[in-house]
Amino acid sequence: MLSNRKRILVVDDEDSVRCLLREIFRKEGYQVDLAENGLEALNLVERSQYDLAIIDIRMPVMDGLELFHVFLEKHPEIIVIIITAFASVDTAVEAMKLGAYNYISKPFNIAEIKLNVKRALESKDLAEEVKELRQEIQKRYSINNIIGHSGKMQEIYKTVGRVANCNVTVLIQGESGTGKELIAKAIHYNSRRKEAPLVKVNCAALPEGLLESELFGHEKGAFTGALEKTKGKFEQ
């Protein structure tokens, strides 16, 4: 059983399919709600929070693709898996291009749909963890968390604020232990690049023979010991 019970919404106009999926996923430890068309699904979503929705493409009242578009606009946090008959595979592929996690063809394989749901929810958990971690890092390296109230430090804070959102090269100088790396992180995590990785290179520790490979990367077999393709620091 799952310790943190995820909530799944099954939307399908076939009663047998709805009941089967409810039985399958309740046994897996999920909370499962059912809707027989898109409008009923929207009413449920307005009252409850869902982690994932399994949506049939062809339904009366509001079809699955129309419902998916509403989810994209108003409930993008809900992961969507499309159920489709062979004739509407192209529509399901279109939905995937827009952001659906995957599509399952009818008649579906129970093991396949269970695996898809498991992986989709794991990816959702991972995305949320990454988001929380980034927020924590940005908070940690906020200017407000840097110790120092002297006039010189105030000038540094103002400089960090000016350069953080500019596309410029910044040189930070100072003796060992004065907080150069802390200021570099403050600039990065308060800039437009904060969602991208901060790649650190200790140039003094790079042997001359490895400098080019470290900075620009190399292809597999480019030299003795190059067992696989490696991205350089610039590409990272």
Image (cartoon, grey):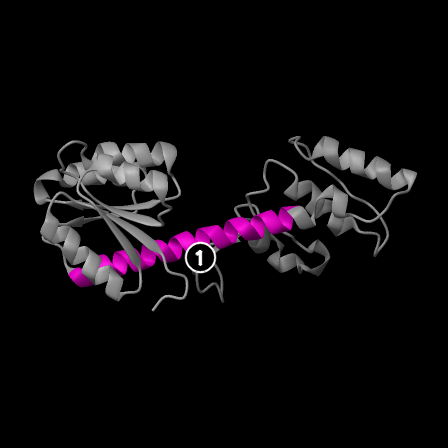
Residue for point 35% across, 38% down: 46
Q: Observer-nearest residue: 60 or 230?
A: 60
Q: Nearer the viewer, residue 119 or 63?
A: 63
Mark 1 element type:
loop
Quadrant for the N terminus, please: bottom left
Is 220 a magenta residue? no
Q: Is residue 58 left or right of residue 152?
A: left
What predominant SS class does the magenta segment belong to? helix
User: Label 1: how many residues lie within 10 Å, few (<14), some (14-19) or many (20+)?
Assistant: few
Question: Measured from the top left, where is residue 21 in percent x and y?
Answer: 19, 56
Residue 76: name its quadrant. Answer: top left
Residue positioned 65% across, 52% down in the render: 200
Residue 113 position by quadrant: bottom left
- Who is closer to the viewer here, 50 or 191? 50
Q: Which residue is mark 1?
A: 229
Q: Position of residue 190 (x, y in %)?
A: 66, 39
Q: Amino acid at mark 1?
A: Lys
Q: For the magenta stretch, what is the residue range?
A: 110-138
Front-most of 53 and 119? 53
Quarter of the figure with residue 176: bottom right
